[in-house]
Amino acid sequence: MTDEADRRAIAIGIVGPGLVGKTLIAQLAEQADRLLKEWNLELQVYGVTDSRWMLLSATPIDLSTWQSALDKQETEANLDSFTYHFASIQHPADKIIIDCTASAAVPCFYTKWLSLGIHVVTPNKRMGSGPLQEYLQVKEAQRRYGAHFLAEASVGAGLPVLSTARSLLCTGDRISTVEGVFSGTLSYIFNTYGPGRSFSEVVMEAKKKGYTEPDPRDDLSGMDVARKVVILAREAGLRLELEAVEVQSLVPEPLRAAQSAAEFLDGLPQFDEEMAARAEEAETACRKLVYVGLVEVASGRCTVGLKAYAKDHPFAQLSGSDNVISFSSRRYNQQPLIIRGPGAGAEVTAAGVFSDLIQVAHGLGACV
């Protein structure tokens, strides 16, 4: 039995109960008994809001019925009201808001939340790769108010990418380069693309399987990878804006202004020969095409684009939608530190967020 006096309860607010948010809530529900039994830890949800409605409660929300309760709500979504609700909670005293959106608007509240002593966990890339001044304001608020801000899942889903970078730097190492396959979507496309397959066919297949954004141009433009590169570059000490990243888009110039995803996909087969020529050139040289991001710390140069790697290179040996990230540093100068694993999917992304939650709980004194 657990001692109630020793229990560590934390109030959780979830913004954006989409695919990742719903999966996270399911994981919280599934692990609740174990967390309480093994660690006397209660992660209790006191608020959930989507873009239209919000569910706020003075007591922990039943995670088996939260969706139906939200569906019945007539309280319109308002992040100021959501913030006030969490600032007003007296017990438990520790509070965490999780931003599971891809919105650029929600991160505008991070500084406010941190200033109120509310910790922030997110897989959202918009703050880490957004305007540098806003990013620095959040980091300063984190330091000034002693609140936690963790965004591990913003780069590698459930992979320990940012924590590895921090570990290297905190122990006195100096990172020289970070290079990797940061897009599960583009990883799948180039792991599937090969002899007998056209590029447009593989893109269409990836879309049908749900690996791409609703408009595949959002993946093929390379901007998602560029955002992850900026986040890592800033962790490594660079102060750069997203616009400074050199990005090679895989969207053919004539199709960038297509009015819809359907129009884009209809026109993509016209450009299959261009990609086939690049793939054939790589194959002749016993290489494989891989879409990578690169951070060169000394020069401050960051690039994103398609490269050809020898087939025995770790980047050329991926399967499915795997990601791989390589750190070269003063300590890892002969052989880089490699992290590899699933880089996409709601389950692993939610697990990455869950891991950050546990890390915050540990920082607050939970015996985990």
Image (spheres, rainbow, N blue to C red):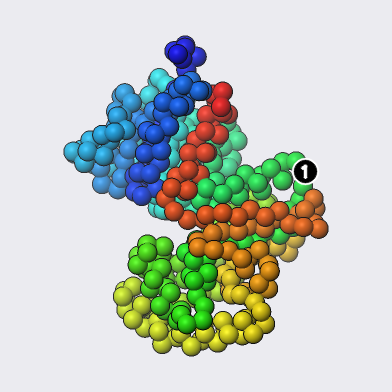
Up the image or down, 79 lies above or below 214; here it is above
Residue 49 visible here? yes
Which quarter of the image is occupied by the C terminus? Answer: top right
- Residue 337, image x, y percentages: 71, 53
Up the image or down, 229 lies above or below 109; here it is below
Tally the marks: 1
Farthest residue in the front direction? 196
Image point 46% across, 80% down: which residue?
197
- Residue 108, image x, y percentages: 44, 46
Image point 63% across, 57% down: which residue?
325
Residue 55 visible here? no
Considering depth in this image, is 195 or 89 the residue closer to the camera?
195
Considering depth in this image, is 142 or 183 the residue closer to the camera?
183
Q: Left or right: where does residue 310 sit relative to residue 19? A: right
To which residue does mark 1 refer?
172
Q: Secondary structure at mark 1?
A: loop
